Amino acid sequence: MELRISDKISKIAPSITLSIDAKLKQMLADGIKVYGFGVGEPDFETPKYIRDAAVEAIDKGMTKYTPAQGTMELRKAICAKMKRDHGLEYNPNQIIASSGAKHSLSNSFAAILNPGDEVIVPVPYWVSYTEIIKLNDGVPVLVPTKKENGFKMTKEELMSAVTSKTKAILLNTPNNPTGSIYTESELKDIADVAVSNNIYVVSDEIYEQLTYDGKKHISIAALGEDIKELSIVINGMSKAYAMTGWRLGYACANEKIIKAMSSVQSHAVSHPSSITQYASVVALNGPQDDVHKMVEQFAKRRTYMFDRLSKIEGLKCLMPDGAFYIYVDITNYINKELCGQKINSSLDFAQILLEQGHVAVIPGAAFGTDNFIRFSYATSMEIIEKGIDAFEDFVKKNLK
Ligand SMILES: Cc1ncc(COP(=O)(O)O)c(C=O)c1O
Protein backbone atom coordinates (compact mmCIF):
# COMPACT_ATOMS: atom_id res chain seq x y z
CA MET A 1 0.00 0.00 0.00
CA GLU A 2 1.41 3.41 -0.93
CA LEU A 3 1.05 5.96 1.87
CA ARG A 4 0.90 9.43 0.42
CA ILE A 5 1.72 12.62 2.31
CA SER A 6 1.05 16.16 1.16
CA ASP A 7 3.22 17.62 -1.62
CA LYS A 8 3.76 20.72 0.50
CA ILE A 9 5.11 18.78 3.46
CA SER A 10 7.40 16.64 1.34
CA LYS A 11 9.15 19.85 0.25
CA ILE A 12 9.94 20.84 3.85
CA ALA A 13 13.47 20.10 5.05
CA PRO A 14 13.79 18.75 8.60
CA SER A 15 15.74 21.00 11.00
CA ILE A 16 19.50 20.31 10.65
CA THR A 17 20.10 21.73 14.13
CA LEU A 18 17.67 19.32 15.74
CA SER A 19 19.03 16.35 13.78
CA ILE A 20 22.63 17.14 14.85
CA ASP A 21 21.39 17.44 18.43
CA ALA A 22 19.61 14.07 18.13
CA LYS A 23 22.82 12.44 16.84
CA LEU A 24 24.83 14.01 19.66
CA LYS A 25 22.34 12.77 22.27
CA GLN A 26 22.50 9.27 20.76
CA MET A 27 26.33 9.32 20.96
CA LEU A 28 26.12 10.45 24.59
CA ALA A 29 23.59 7.69 25.33
CA ASP A 30 26.04 5.20 23.78
CA GLY A 31 28.62 6.35 26.32
CA ILE A 32 30.69 8.44 23.89
CA LYS A 33 32.10 11.71 25.27
CA VAL A 34 30.98 14.46 22.90
CA TYR A 35 31.37 18.24 23.21
CA GLY A 36 28.17 19.94 22.11
CA PHE A 37 28.29 23.39 20.53
CA GLY A 38 25.24 22.73 18.39
CA VAL A 39 21.86 23.59 19.76
CA GLY A 40 21.03 27.10 20.96
CA GLU A 41 19.77 26.26 24.41
CA PRO A 42 20.96 27.95 27.62
CA ASP A 43 22.59 25.43 29.97
CA PHE A 44 21.28 27.37 33.02
CA GLU A 45 18.36 26.18 35.12
CA THR A 46 15.20 28.25 34.83
CA PRO A 47 15.51 30.77 37.72
CA LYS A 48 14.05 29.51 41.00
CA TYR A 49 11.35 32.18 41.37
CA ILE A 50 9.93 31.17 37.99
CA ARG A 51 9.96 27.46 38.83
CA ASP A 52 8.27 28.26 42.16
CA ALA A 53 5.58 30.20 40.32
CA ALA A 54 4.79 27.16 38.16
CA VAL A 55 4.36 24.98 41.26
CA GLU A 56 2.11 27.67 42.72
CA ALA A 57 0.07 27.71 39.50
CA ILE A 58 -0.57 23.97 39.80
CA ASP A 59 -1.37 24.19 43.52
CA LYS A 60 -3.75 27.09 42.93
CA GLY A 61 -5.57 25.14 40.23
CA MET A 62 -4.49 27.30 37.30
CA THR A 63 -4.78 24.16 35.22
CA LYS A 64 -7.78 24.93 33.05
CA TYR A 65 -8.18 26.32 29.52
CA THR A 66 -7.25 29.99 29.13
CA PRO A 67 -8.33 32.40 26.38
CA ALA A 68 -6.75 31.40 23.03
CA GLN A 69 -4.79 34.65 22.90
CA GLY A 70 -3.31 34.04 26.38
CA THR A 71 -4.40 35.21 29.83
CA MET A 72 -5.11 38.89 30.38
CA GLU A 73 -2.44 38.94 33.15
CA LEU A 74 0.21 37.66 30.73
CA ARG A 75 -0.76 40.01 27.93
CA LYS A 76 -0.66 42.93 30.39
CA ALA A 77 2.79 41.82 31.60
CA ILE A 78 3.98 41.73 27.96
CA CYS A 79 2.57 45.24 27.36
CA ALA A 80 4.43 46.49 30.45
CA LYS A 81 7.64 44.84 29.23
CA MET A 82 7.38 46.43 25.78
CA LYS A 83 6.81 49.84 27.38
CA ARG A 84 9.68 49.37 29.85
CA ASP A 85 12.25 48.12 27.33
CA HIS A 86 11.24 49.96 24.14
CA GLY A 87 8.83 52.74 25.09
CA LEU A 88 6.30 50.91 22.89
CA GLU A 89 2.60 51.28 23.75
CA TYR A 90 0.57 48.16 23.10
CA ASN A 91 -2.77 47.17 24.60
CA PRO A 92 -3.59 43.53 25.46
CA ASN A 93 -5.64 43.15 22.24
CA GLN A 94 -2.40 43.71 20.33
CA ILE A 95 -0.64 40.80 22.03
CA ILE A 96 -0.86 37.03 21.58
CA ALA A 97 0.99 34.39 23.61
CA SER A 98 1.90 31.15 21.81
CA SER A 99 3.81 27.94 22.43
CA GLY A 100 7.26 29.39 21.70
CA ALA A 101 8.55 32.11 19.39
CA LYS A 102 8.67 29.52 16.62
CA HIS A 103 4.93 29.09 17.01
CA SER A 104 4.43 32.88 17.06
CA LEU A 105 6.33 33.08 13.75
CA SER A 106 4.23 30.32 12.29
CA ASN A 107 0.99 32.04 13.38
CA SER A 108 2.24 35.36 11.94
CA PHE A 109 2.84 33.95 8.48
CA ALA A 110 -0.43 32.00 8.58
CA ALA A 111 -2.16 35.29 9.34
CA ILE A 112 -0.61 37.45 6.60
CA LEU A 113 0.36 35.25 3.66
CA ASN A 114 -1.64 34.33 0.57
CA PRO A 115 -0.29 31.61 -1.75
CA GLY A 116 2.68 32.96 -3.72
CA ASP A 117 3.33 35.96 -1.45
CA GLU A 118 7.04 36.67 -1.13
CA VAL A 119 8.91 37.10 2.14
CA ILE A 120 12.38 38.63 2.03
CA VAL A 121 14.85 36.70 4.17
CA PRO A 122 18.41 38.01 4.58
CA VAL A 123 21.11 35.31 4.35
CA PRO A 124 22.43 33.85 6.63
CA TYR A 125 19.10 33.04 8.25
CA TRP A 126 17.84 30.88 11.08
CA VAL A 127 17.01 27.39 9.76
CA SER A 128 13.28 27.44 10.41
CA TYR A 129 12.34 30.71 8.66
CA THR A 130 12.28 29.42 5.11
CA GLU A 131 10.39 26.26 6.06
CA ILE A 132 7.80 28.13 8.16
CA ILE A 133 7.19 30.50 5.23
CA LYS A 134 6.79 27.58 2.82
CA LEU A 135 4.46 25.78 5.23
CA ASN A 136 2.24 28.84 5.05
CA ASP A 137 2.21 28.94 1.22
CA GLY A 138 4.71 31.80 0.99
CA VAL A 139 7.84 32.06 -1.11
CA PRO A 140 11.07 32.85 0.75
CA VAL A 141 13.21 35.30 -1.25
CA LEU A 142 16.78 34.90 -0.06
CA VAL A 143 18.89 38.06 -0.04
CA PRO A 144 22.63 37.47 0.35
CA THR A 145 24.35 39.94 2.68
CA LYS A 146 28.02 40.84 2.99
CA LYS A 147 30.42 39.78 5.71
CA GLU A 148 31.98 43.27 5.68
CA ASN A 149 28.55 44.68 6.64
CA GLY A 150 28.31 42.23 9.54
CA PHE A 151 25.88 40.20 7.41
CA LYS A 152 23.25 42.90 7.82
CA MET A 153 20.96 43.63 4.89
CA THR A 154 21.49 47.13 3.46
CA LYS A 155 18.77 49.37 2.05
CA GLU A 156 20.04 48.74 -1.50
CA GLU A 157 20.09 44.96 -1.04
CA LEU A 158 16.56 45.09 0.34
CA MET A 159 15.24 47.38 -2.41
CA SER A 160 16.62 45.17 -5.14
CA ALA A 161 14.60 42.23 -3.75
CA VAL A 162 11.25 44.03 -3.44
CA THR A 163 8.64 43.05 -6.06
CA SER A 164 4.90 43.56 -6.40
CA LYS A 165 4.49 40.21 -4.58
CA THR A 166 6.56 41.15 -1.52
CA LYS A 167 4.39 40.81 1.56
CA ALA A 168 6.93 40.85 4.37
CA ILE A 169 10.54 41.22 5.43
CA LEU A 170 11.96 38.85 8.00
CA LEU A 171 14.30 40.65 10.35
CA ASN A 172 16.28 38.93 13.10
CA THR A 173 18.28 41.10 15.47
CA PRO A 174 20.32 40.16 17.46
CA ASN A 175 20.96 37.58 14.81
CA ASN A 176 21.20 33.82 14.82
CA PRO A 177 23.75 32.66 13.53
CA THR A 178 25.95 35.79 13.23
CA GLY A 179 25.26 37.60 16.52
CA SER A 180 25.03 40.90 14.59
CA ILE A 181 22.78 43.68 15.87
CA TYR A 182 21.17 46.22 13.52
CA THR A 183 21.87 49.83 14.55
CA GLU A 184 19.15 52.46 14.68
CA SER A 185 20.15 53.93 11.32
CA GLU A 186 20.26 50.48 9.68
CA LEU A 187 16.78 49.79 11.06
CA LYS A 188 15.55 53.15 9.78
CA ASP A 189 16.70 52.17 6.29
CA ILE A 190 14.70 48.92 6.49
CA ALA A 191 11.70 50.77 7.94
CA ASP A 192 11.77 53.36 5.11
CA VAL A 193 11.57 50.64 2.47
CA ALA A 194 8.85 48.76 4.37
CA VAL A 195 6.69 51.87 4.87
CA SER A 196 7.06 53.21 1.33
CA ASN A 197 6.14 49.80 -0.15
CA ASN A 198 3.53 48.83 2.48
CA ILE A 199 5.40 45.67 3.47
CA TYR A 200 5.16 43.96 6.87
CA VAL A 201 8.26 43.48 8.99
CA VAL A 202 8.24 40.29 11.01
CA SER A 203 10.88 41.18 13.59
CA ASP A 204 12.27 38.23 15.53
CA GLU A 205 13.73 39.73 18.71
CA ILE A 206 14.13 36.53 20.74
CA TYR A 207 17.79 37.37 21.57
CA GLU A 208 16.94 40.93 22.62
CA GLN A 209 18.32 40.63 26.17
CA LEU A 210 21.56 38.94 25.12
CA THR A 211 23.78 41.83 24.05
CA TYR A 212 27.41 42.59 24.93
CA ASP A 213 30.00 45.38 25.16
CA GLY A 214 27.30 47.99 25.82
CA LYS A 215 25.58 47.29 22.48
CA LYS A 216 21.81 47.59 22.76
CA HIS A 217 18.97 46.04 20.86
CA ILE A 218 16.44 48.41 19.30
CA SER A 219 13.03 47.22 18.18
CA ILE A 220 12.18 48.42 14.66
CA ALA A 221 8.59 48.99 15.84
CA ALA A 222 9.86 51.77 18.12
CA LEU A 223 10.98 53.91 15.17
CA GLY A 224 7.62 55.54 14.49
CA GLU A 225 3.88 54.95 14.19
CA ASP A 226 3.98 53.95 10.50
CA ILE A 227 6.53 51.19 10.95
CA LYS A 228 4.90 50.07 14.23
CA GLU A 229 1.67 49.54 12.27
CA LEU A 230 3.50 47.23 9.83
CA SER A 231 5.60 45.39 12.43
CA ILE A 232 4.92 42.02 13.98
CA VAL A 233 7.36 41.86 16.87
CA ILE A 234 8.22 38.32 17.96
CA ASN A 235 9.79 37.49 21.30
CA GLY A 236 9.67 34.79 23.96
CA MET A 237 10.91 33.34 27.21
CA SER A 238 13.25 30.60 25.88
CA LYS A 239 16.58 32.35 25.63
CA ALA A 240 16.58 35.18 28.20
CA TYR A 241 14.91 33.22 31.01
CA ALA A 242 16.35 29.78 30.18
CA MET A 243 12.83 28.47 29.57
CA THR A 244 13.23 26.56 26.30
CA GLY A 245 11.13 23.57 27.36
CA TRP A 246 8.31 25.67 28.82
CA ARG A 247 7.26 26.87 25.35
CA LEU A 248 6.19 30.47 25.59
CA GLY A 249 6.58 32.99 22.80
CA TYR A 250 4.57 36.07 21.96
CA ALA A 251 3.78 38.52 19.19
CA CYS A 252 2.91 42.22 19.35
CA ALA A 253 1.16 43.76 16.34
CA ASN A 254 -1.89 45.55 15.05
CA GLU A 255 -5.12 44.18 16.54
CA LYS A 256 -6.34 42.96 13.14
CA ILE A 257 -3.27 40.75 12.70
CA ILE A 258 -3.39 39.50 16.30
CA LYS A 259 -7.07 38.57 15.84
CA ALA A 260 -6.17 36.53 12.75
CA MET A 261 -3.29 34.84 14.59
CA SER A 262 -5.58 34.08 17.51
CA SER A 263 -8.08 32.48 15.18
CA VAL A 264 -5.37 30.21 13.69
CA GLN A 265 -4.08 29.32 17.14
CA SER A 266 -7.53 28.61 18.57
CA HIS A 267 -8.05 25.83 16.02
CA ALA A 268 -4.54 24.38 16.30
CA VAL A 269 -3.44 24.28 19.94
CA SER A 270 -6.03 26.49 21.70
CA HIS A 271 -3.37 28.31 23.76
CA PRO A 272 0.02 27.77 25.41
CA SER A 273 0.12 25.88 28.73
CA SER A 274 -1.76 27.66 31.52
CA ILE A 275 1.06 26.85 33.96
CA THR A 276 3.72 28.29 31.68
CA GLN A 277 1.63 31.42 31.18
CA TYR A 278 1.29 31.92 34.95
CA ALA A 279 5.05 31.47 35.49
CA SER A 280 5.84 33.81 32.58
CA VAL A 281 3.88 36.62 34.22
CA VAL A 282 6.07 36.21 37.30
CA ALA A 283 9.21 36.09 35.11
CA LEU A 284 8.35 39.25 33.20
CA ASN A 285 7.13 41.28 36.19
CA GLY A 286 9.79 40.07 38.63
CA PRO A 287 13.36 41.29 39.23
CA GLN A 288 15.50 40.77 36.15
CA ASP A 289 18.71 40.04 38.13
CA ASP A 290 18.88 36.42 37.00
CA VAL A 291 18.71 37.46 33.36
CA HIS A 292 21.58 39.91 33.93
CA LYS A 293 23.64 37.23 35.70
CA MET A 294 23.19 34.83 32.77
CA VAL A 295 24.15 37.56 30.29
CA GLU A 296 27.35 38.20 32.31
CA GLN A 297 28.23 34.51 31.99
CA PHE A 298 27.49 34.47 28.26
CA ALA A 299 29.72 37.54 27.84
CA LYS A 300 32.69 35.77 29.49
CA ARG A 301 32.20 32.64 27.40
CA ARG A 302 31.92 34.70 24.22
CA THR A 303 35.25 36.46 24.78
CA TYR A 304 37.01 33.21 25.69
CA MET A 305 35.61 31.25 22.77
CA PHE A 306 36.27 34.03 20.29
CA ASP A 307 39.90 34.37 21.43
CA ARG A 308 40.52 30.64 21.25
CA LEU A 309 38.85 30.09 17.86
CA SER A 310 40.50 33.16 16.32
CA LYS A 311 43.92 31.69 17.10
CA ILE A 312 43.27 28.44 15.23
CA GLU A 313 45.01 28.46 11.88
CA GLY A 314 42.74 28.93 8.90
CA LEU A 315 39.61 30.05 10.80
CA LYS A 316 38.11 33.52 10.54
CA CYS A 317 35.62 34.45 13.25
CA LEU A 318 33.02 37.14 13.40
CA MET A 319 32.86 38.87 16.82
CA PRO A 320 29.19 38.63 17.85
CA ASP A 321 27.49 41.64 19.46
CA GLY A 322 24.56 39.57 20.70
CA ALA A 323 22.87 36.14 20.97
CA PHE A 324 25.13 33.20 21.95
CA TYR A 325 26.79 32.01 18.76
CA ILE A 326 30.09 32.51 16.97
CA TYR A 327 29.93 32.20 13.21
CA VAL A 328 33.19 30.89 11.85
CA ASP A 329 34.41 31.12 8.27
CA ILE A 330 35.94 27.77 7.22
CA THR A 331 36.56 28.70 3.57
CA ASN A 332 40.22 27.75 4.09
CA TYR A 333 39.20 24.19 5.01
CA ILE A 334 36.96 23.54 1.99
CA ASN A 335 38.58 21.20 -0.58
CA LYS A 336 41.08 19.97 2.01
CA GLU A 337 40.91 16.52 3.61
CA LEU A 338 39.77 15.72 7.15
CA CYS A 339 40.63 12.19 8.34
CA GLY A 340 41.34 11.30 4.71
CA GLN A 341 37.91 12.47 3.46
CA LYS A 342 37.55 15.44 1.14
CA ILE A 343 35.64 18.39 2.62
CA ASN A 344 33.27 19.59 -0.09
CA SER A 345 30.94 21.50 2.20
CA SER A 346 30.27 22.61 5.77
CA LEU A 347 28.04 19.54 6.11
CA ASP A 348 30.98 17.22 5.36
CA PHE A 349 33.13 19.08 7.86
CA ALA A 350 30.51 19.05 10.64
CA GLN A 351 29.74 15.38 10.07
CA ILE A 352 33.36 14.18 10.23
CA LEU A 353 34.00 16.47 13.20
CA LEU A 354 31.06 14.97 15.10
CA GLU A 355 31.61 11.33 14.19
CA GLN A 356 35.38 11.21 14.50
CA GLY A 357 36.33 14.28 16.54
CA HIS A 358 33.33 14.08 18.90
CA VAL A 359 32.63 17.82 18.67
CA ALA A 360 29.19 19.01 17.54
CA VAL A 361 28.80 22.27 15.57
CA ILE A 362 26.13 23.36 13.11
CA PRO A 363 27.15 23.50 9.42
CA GLY A 364 26.63 26.90 7.79
CA ALA A 365 24.63 25.17 5.03
CA ALA A 366 21.75 25.16 7.53
CA PHE A 367 21.82 28.98 7.44
CA GLY A 368 22.35 29.39 3.70
CA THR A 369 26.12 30.06 3.87
CA ASP A 370 27.98 26.84 3.22
CA ASN A 371 31.54 27.96 4.03
CA PHE A 372 30.77 28.61 7.71
CA ILE A 373 30.14 26.65 10.89
CA ARG A 374 28.30 27.88 13.98
CA PHE A 375 29.49 27.36 17.54
CA SER A 376 27.03 27.96 20.37
CA TYR A 377 28.44 29.20 23.68
CA ALA A 378 25.24 28.46 25.57
CA THR A 379 27.14 25.80 27.43
CA SER A 380 29.41 25.66 30.48
CA MET A 381 32.88 27.20 30.53
CA GLU A 382 34.29 23.75 31.31
CA ILE A 383 32.77 22.25 28.16
CA ILE A 384 33.91 25.26 26.14
CA GLU A 385 37.51 24.94 27.37
CA LYS A 386 37.74 21.17 26.88
CA GLY A 387 35.68 21.18 23.68
CA ILE A 388 37.81 23.83 21.99
CA ASP A 389 40.94 21.92 23.07
CA ALA A 390 39.46 18.81 21.44
CA PHE A 391 38.45 20.73 18.30
CA GLU A 392 41.87 22.36 17.92
CA ASP A 393 43.70 19.09 18.48
CA PHE A 394 41.48 17.19 16.03
CA VAL A 395 41.86 19.78 13.27
CA LYS A 396 45.64 20.06 13.79
CA LYS A 397 46.11 16.30 13.56
CA ASN A 398 43.64 15.42 10.85
CA LEU A 399 43.30 18.33 8.41
CA LYS A 400 45.51 17.95 5.39
C1 LIG B 1 16.24 33.24 15.78
C2 LIG B 1 15.35 32.34 16.56
N1 LIG B 1 14.03 32.59 16.58
C3 LIG B 1 13.19 31.80 17.26
C4 LIG B 1 13.64 30.70 17.96
C5 LIG B 1 12.62 29.82 18.64
O1 LIG B 1 12.50 30.05 19.99
P1 LIG B 1 11.36 29.32 20.83
O2 LIG B 1 12.05 28.35 21.72
O3 LIG B 1 10.73 30.43 21.62
O4 LIG B 1 10.41 28.69 19.90
C6 LIG B 1 15.00 30.39 17.95
C7 LIG B 1 15.49 29.19 18.65
O5 LIG B 1 16.57 28.68 18.44
C8 LIG B 1 15.88 31.24 17.24
O6 LIG B 1 17.20 31.00 17.21
Image: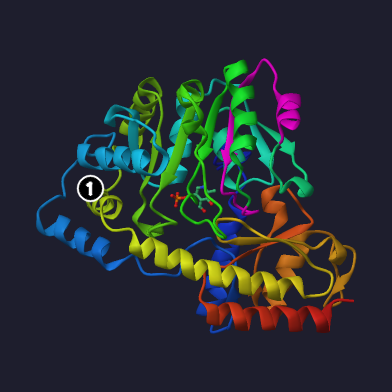
Closer to the camera in the image, 309 or 225 = 225
Q: Position of residue 187 (x, y in %)?
A: 60, 35
Q: Is residue 175 magenta?
A: yes
In which quadrant of the rendered image does the N terminus lie? top right
Q: Position of residue 302 (x, y in %)?
A: 59, 68
Closer to the camera in the image, 93 or 31 = 93
Residue wearing tag 1: 274
Q: Position of residue 124 (x, y in %)?
A: 69, 46
| Segment tinted magenta in the rendering | 154-179
Residue 314 picture quarter: bottom right
Where is 183 relative to 155, above or below?
A: below
Please, what is the three-letter code of the amino acid marked with disc 1? Ser
Residue 256 picture quarter: top left
Residue 324 picture quarter: bottom right
Q: Residue at x 52, y 49 (%)?
A: 216
Q: Position of residue 218 (x, y in %)?
A: 51, 41
Q: Residue at x 62, y 46 (%)?
A: 13
